Image: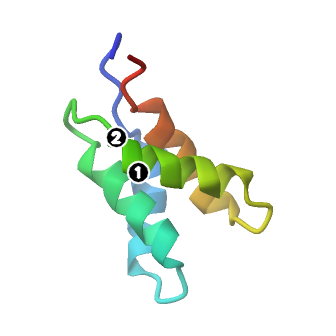
Amino acid sequence: MSKNEKSGTKVTKTAAKVLSSPKSSPMAKSLAGSALAQANTTKQSSSATATKAAKALTDGRTAKSTKSLAGSVLTQKDKR
């Protein structure tokens, strides 16, 4: 990873809301957990999580908050 990407305040707030909502999808909760895990660390997204995030971004039914989390997760994927 060329720079130390971390989940920002807006993303972490969104992730917290997604995790606390009983209406959130399992995919949204998974991406939220990943985004929170990367909030104050240099951890990178795994390939499996990045694949899940990419699917969320291309699915027309995905909620705006889930797409935001997916974008954050993909940004934190090692580019190598």
| Vertical arrangement, residue 53 with respect to residue 20, above or below | above
Residue 37's spot in the image, x, y percent? 25, 50
Question: Given the image, on which type of amino acid does mark 2 rest?
Answer: Ser
Disc 1 crowd, CA 10 A, few/some/many (<14, 14-19, 20+): some
Question: Given the image, on which type of amino acid does mark 1 rest?
Answer: Thr
Marks 2 and 1, how far apart at CA? 6 Å
Disc 2 crowd, CA 10 A, few/some/many (<14, 14-19, 20+): many
Q: Secondary structure at mark 2?
A: loop
Which quadrant is the N terminus positioned in?
Answer: top left
- For residue 64, which quarter of the picture? bottom right
Residue at 40 percent of width and 51 percent of height: 49
Q: What residue is shown with label 2?
A: 45
Q: Mark 2 touching mark 1, by CB under 8 A?
A: yes
Residue at 69 percent of width and 66 percent of height: 63
| Vertical arrangement, residue 35 with respect to residue 18, above or below | above
| Vertical arrangement, residue 42 with respect to residue 70, above or below | above
Residue 22's spot in the image, x, y percent? 47, 89
Residue at 47 percent of width and 82 percent of height: 21
Q: Residue furthest bottom?
A: 22
Q: In this image, 53 relative to 48: left or right?
A: right
Viewer-side residue, 3 vs 54 = 54
| Vertical arrangement, residue 47 with respect to residue 3, above or below | below
Residue 15's spot in the image, x, y percent? 43, 61
Residue at 72 percent of width and 51 percent of height: 58
How is the protein colored in the picture?
Answer: rainbow
Q: Secondary structure at mark 1?
A: helix
Q: What residue is shown with label 1?
A: 49
Q: In this image, 71 relative to 59: left or right?
A: left
Viewer-side residue, 37 vs 78 = 78
Which quadrant is the C terminus positioned in?
Answer: top left
Residue 63 is marked as none
